[in-house]
Amino acid sequence: MTKDSRGRTYVRDGQVGFFFLLAYIGAAIYFISVSDGSFWGVILGLLQAIVWPVYVVYHVLVGLGA
């Protein structure tokens, strides 16, 4: 966040948010495509798309022996 001389605030975090949106959409497409196609399979795929970075960090830490 940046303030100018008039007191206006500028937020320049849009690029990072857009990257995370694209990552979520890509993960959702992947997890839905590997599901069985049922309603609950699609819902589970959408939920997995939200939390997939947690799985990545966990497996990296296990691989490092932490």
Image (tube, rainbow, N blue to C red):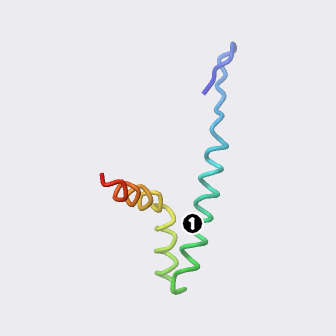
Residue depicted at 34% across the width and 58% down the height: 62
**Location of residue 14 (image quadrant):** top right
- In this figure, which residue is indicated by the disc labeled 1? 27
**In the image, what residue type sits under mark 1?**
Ala
Q: Is residue 37 above or below residue 6?
A: below
Q: Position of residue 35 (x, y in %)?
A: 52, 82
Q: Position of residue 49 (x, y in %)?
A: 51, 65
Q: Position of residue 64 (x, y in %)?
A: 36, 54
**Location of residue 9 (image quadrant):** top right
Q: Residues within 10 Å of mark 1 (few under 14, many from 20)?
A: some
Q: In the rendered view, does 34 fall on the left or right side of 15?
A: left
Q: Position of residue 61 (x, y in %)?
A: 36, 54
- Front one among 49 and 60: 60
Quarter of the figure that contains the N terminus: top right
- Residue at the farthest top position: 5
Q: Is residue 41 above or below residue 10?
A: below
